[in-house]
Image: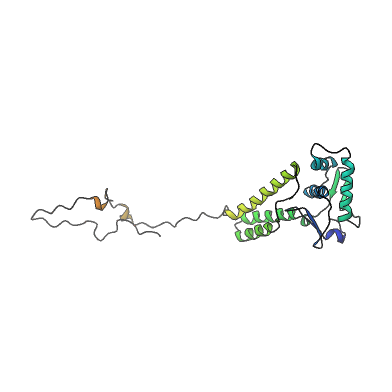
Amino acid sequence: MTDNSATQALRFEILGQVRAYRHDEPVDIGSLNQRAVLAVLLLHARSPVPINKIIHTLWDDDPPENAVDIVQRYVGGLRRALDPDRTSLLALTPDGYMLSAGTSAVDASVFRASLARARDAHQTGNLQEATGEVHQAFRLWQDEPLAGLTGPVFESARARLNQERTAAANLLAKPAPEEPTMLAPPVAVEPTVLTAAVPAEPVAAQPAPVPAPSGYQEPVDPWAGHDLFPPSPF
């Protein structure tokens, strides 16, 4: 953005309806088509957009004969609304029209910056910082991005922004790569327990004990007083 205080005070939204604000006061950006011209310039902020691309965005493959004149009128309307001091905020370059909006002036750019910081924090295991960045990024969303604007260019941009929003949500749904998966702690097992012979059938299914012949001792349970299984870890 330029050094002019009026243009420095501007901010733009596309994560919902396309809007412009100056000192938090709404700026009238005109008709739906003029709003669409602003939107395509914001999608390519700080890069020139050829007039043929703007025409294709507005009318696809069926532009009016005076499409160039109409686009020039829309750009003139945006200049009057956004840049009354006639700075270089919206300029015609050899490669097309360019809107010199700073990264912090467009909500989608702020969202992407927060998402990048969230990814970095997530990769280093700082989940608290990553979560805070994601929630801050989500607060920028008002509605479907570029709400009310139709056509292949805006549909593609809308899908891309929604994919980035899903990527941000995924950071909240999975642990960092370095974070170990939570498993039940290993249970120490006594060696003698592992060698214990487990009965092949449940105790209830075993036949009744046969009385010992006279002259022999009463049967003795060899496992009396011993644990057949280790204690439950839960």
Q: How many marks?
A: 0
- Relative image position of residue 152 (x, y in whole percent): 74, 41
Please indicate whether residue 230 sits to the left or right of residue 131 in the image: left
- Relative image position of residue 231 (x, y in whole percent): 35, 59
Query: Is the residue 30 above or below the residue 67 in the image?
Result: below
Please indicate whether residue 27 sits to the left or right of residue 145 in the image: right
Q: Which quadrant would the N terminus be assigned to in this image?
A: bottom right
In the image shown, does 27 or 88 lie closer to the viewer?
Answer: 27
Asked whether residue 135 is in view, the answer is yes
Please indicate whether residue 204 sits to the left or right of residue 91 in the image: left
In the image shown, does 160 or 126 lie closer to the viewer?
Answer: 160
- Relative image position of residue 38 (x, y in whole percent): 81, 50
Q: Which quadrant would the C terminus be assigned to in this image?
A: bottom left
Name the residue at 87% across, 55% down: 81
Colour scheme of the rendered structure? rainbow
Name the residue furthest right: 86
In the image shown, does 99 or 120 lie closer to the viewer?
Answer: 99
The part of the image, by quadrant, that contains residue 216 is bottom left
Name the residue at 77% across, 48% down: 43
Name the residue at 85% across, 58% down: 7
- Relative image position of residue 41 (x, y in whole percent): 81, 48
Name the residue furthest left: 215
